[in-house]
Structure formats: C-alpha cells, structure tokens
Image (tube, grey):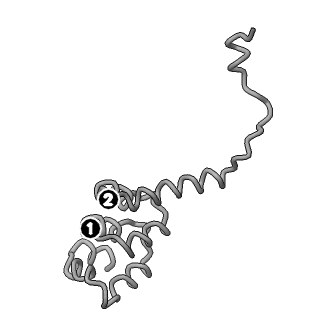
Amino acid sequence: MSTLKTVLKPKTSNSSSKTPQYYNAEKTACITDLAVHSEAAVRKAVASNSHTPTKILTAMLKIEQDKQVLKEVLMNPNIPRKSVATFIFDQSDERVDWFNEDADIIEKFS
C-alpha cells in the first residue's frame, strides 16, 4: 500500500514526449479556433490581445466580416503594416470603406 507522500513524490525521469514545440503548436491551434469562433465577442478578444500571433491577425484581416472585430485587428500593435496596406489597397474589398475616415486607425499609422 502506498502512502500519500510516496504517490506525490516527484518522479526523477521525464518520459513525456511532449516538447515545448508541441505545446506552442497546441496554443496556436487553440487561438486559431477562437479567431474564427461564431461569437463576435470571442473573436474581438482574440483580435485585441497583444499576445495574438501576427500570423493569426493577418488571417483574421483577410476573412473577418464584423466591423468592430476588424477594427480591433487593425488596432492591434502586432498587425504588420504591410498586411494593413495590402488590405487597404485591395479595391475589390468593400470592407476597406468602413475605415477610410477612421481617426483612430489613421492616427495609428501616421
């Protein structure tokens, strides 16, 4: 019969095959799922988070249809200027007109 101390004693060998890369990939997959969540509030939280990876923000910029969420993406400090320029100069994208005269976005990129 084991004692509580024996059961809780740390094991000296780590037999886990899960590496930091594994956990990073899992984190990215989770954020990616949340970035396309059906609730705009969830997507807005991802878009406004300063720890959201650039790759996910850029993907959100390409597909997001909610104006408030899209503004959060554009205002995120991690969104690359090049990605924003690609979005803004896309003449076939009607969403661009939403921000033509947005003072906050103009100030951010000035």
- In contact (CB < 8 Å): disc 2 and disc 1: yes
What type is the residue that disc 1 sits on?
Asp
- Say left or right for 52 vs 38: right
Quadrant where the N terminus lies? Answer: top right
Residue 36: image location, x then y, percent: 39, 62
Q: In which quarter of the image is residue 48?
A: bottom left
Q: Residue furthest front?
A: 38
- Residue 50 vs residue 108, the one in the foreground: 50
As drawn, 73 above or below 33 = below
Q: Identify the disc placed on residue 92.
A: none
User: How many badges with numbers are in the image?
Assistant: 2
Residue holding disc 1: 66
**At 24% across and 71% down in the image, what residue appears?**
104
Q: In which quarter of the image is residue 43?
A: bottom left
Residue holding disc 2: 44
**At 70% across and 18% down in the image, what residue appears?**
7
Kind of element beneath mark 2: helix
- Say left or right for 88 vs 102: right
Residue 14: image location, x then y, percent: 76, 37
What type is the residue that disc 2 sits on?
Lys
Mark whose residue sits in front, 2 or 1? 1
Kind of element beneath mark 1: loop
**At 46% across and 56% down in the image, what residue appears?**
31
As drawn, 1 above or below 48 = above
The residues tagged by marks 2 and 1 sit, at their Cα atoms, a distance apart of 9 Å
Residue 64: image location, x then y, percent: 33, 70
Q: Residue furthest right?
A: 13
